[in-house]
Image (cartoon, rainbow, N blue to C red):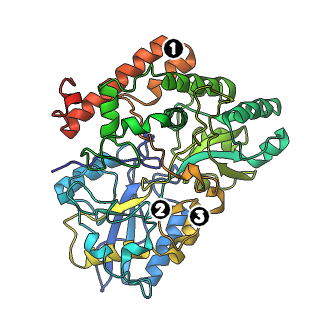
Amino acid sequence: MTLLKPCRIGLAAMLGAALALTACSSSGGGSANGVTTITLEGPNQWTSSGSSFGPAWDKLIAKFEQANPKIKIKTVVLPLSQFNQTESTQLAAGTAPELVFNQASYKPYMVYHLEADLKKPNPYVPGNKQWINQFDPEHYSLEKSIDPAGHVDWMPFNLFEAGVFYNKDAFSKAGVQAPISTFADLMTACGKLQAAGYTPFAMDDSLIGTSWTFNTIAYMMLAKYYGQMNAYDAAGKSGSNPQLTSKDWAKAILSKQVTSKTPEVTESLKLLKQFYDKCVTKNWSGITGTSGAMANIKDFASGTAAMAWGTDYAPAALTGVKFSFASMPFPTITTASSPLATNTPAQFGISTGGTSYMIPAKTNGDKLKAAIKFLQWMSVGKNIQQWLNETGAIPAVTDARIPTEMQGFAKGAWSQAPKVGGIPQGPPGVTNVSLYDGYLLGSKNMSAEQSHLEDMWTKAEVQAVQDNSWTNEPWAKNAK
């Protein structure tokens, strides 16, 4: 059976914060007096706490328990750096609690399959014919959410998106208009913000800033290659897909269809360095990333920095800041900044890589019924709207509203997945930041950076060939 790897996570896969494994309980124990207690276990995506998902979550659980007095929910917060190992081990051993975060590694037989339930009415929605109809079909549907065995294993509580947060007060003081539309305008804005006494863009040593900036730039620069690179469908068979698949990228890298010396890749590296040299925190490489909600959240929250990469979990972490903030896309690369640009708009894409939970296969009886009820209740807009508003999370269901602070992320081209998304990172054990930091810090020239990046891309795709059993493909037969 196929082992499912963790997908994009709002913050847990980005950072290894060493949080304590602690339980935050809104109820305790097992089942008694007709009350069924179930446990939800996962990493904290909102705050740095190792014991709680935050006040908004606690209020949400209390609301559910009030509406469902015969069900109690116990929340166990796992360390961000260990949740995958912990839950994967539990799922394999059959000891996982009733609800687990879906980005653990597992095999399809280890979890309960939801497709039959999703085809039935949601009891919390009068007149609903199929539970699946509650969800945004662009991001979560039976067809788009199946595992390699053909089953639907998890349900999203929200969606994931990232982009740029900006300090409205800083922009006003520096005379910068938001949103910043083009990369050329961004360079101008960085100069104005520096003159006004601000660090233009908060940055640290996490992948949030380095990898996301490079990828966003490269997606725009490489968009012209989509047609010639698009060789496989979502199942990995010959065909096409709206976005490049991981197999498309493996073929492109190992057949040298795209290399680190492809002109648009070289140009992307130059633009990345221009951004770092002109805009970001000067000592960024010495600042350890501590929050997957935002890069260098300390400088942004203190008002020192005017902008920062962040996710839709950031508003919960910014509660109490002394300035107004909002969100916007990263600016578009135009011909004003590069002769190789095609004016393709910047894109990141709303995805289901947010907060999603699944039920282990060993769950049965009243506990299974209670776990399904909780998932059903969590897919009703009126039940979760306050939680969405307080955390900034983007809803996965159609009857809920996008929080005000997240409007800049959730509209237009930025909210759509880039056609050439999925640019390779490094092989296992290699950090994303290490792909670029030597070049950005000046210890590698362009030639050395290209050699390093090509080596890392090749090793990553050789590993992907082995992991996915693509060795029979003509372009992969010599991958070693």
Which amino acid type is marked by label 3? Answer: Ile
At horizontal 84% and vertical 40% (from top left) the residue drawn is 175
**Which residue corresponds to mark 3?**
402
The residue at which mark 1 appears reads as 446
Residue 225 screen position, x and y as percent: 44, 34
Q: Is residue 71 above or below residue 405?
A: below
Identity of the amino acid at label 1? Met
* Disc 2/disc 3 C-alpha distance (Å): 10 Å
The mark nearer the N terminus, 3 or 1, is 3
Helix, strand or loop at label 3? It is loop
Q: Residues within 10 Å of mark 3 (few under 14, many from 20)?
A: some
Look at the numbered disc 1 and give the secondary structure of its residue: helix
Real-space CA distance between mark 3 and mark 1, rounded to the nearest whole angstrom: 42 Å
Q: Residues within 10 Å of mark 2 (few under 14, many from 20)?
A: many
Q: Disc 2 or 1, which lies upstream in sequence?
A: 2
Question: Which sits in the foreground, 90 or 272?
Answer: 272
Task: Give the SS element for disc 2.
Answer: strand
What is the tally of numbered marks visible in this picture? 3
Quadrant of the image containing the C terminus: top left
Q: Is residue 186 left or right of residue 431?
A: right
Image-based side of 57 in relation to 120, left or right: right
Tell me which residue sits at (23%, 28%) in the image: 475
Residue 158, numbered circle: 2
Q: Earlier in the sequence, mark 2 or mark 3?
A: 2
Q: Label 2 vs label 1: CA separation?
A: 40 Å
The mark lying in front, picked from 2 and 1, is 1
Residue 374 in view (yes/no): no
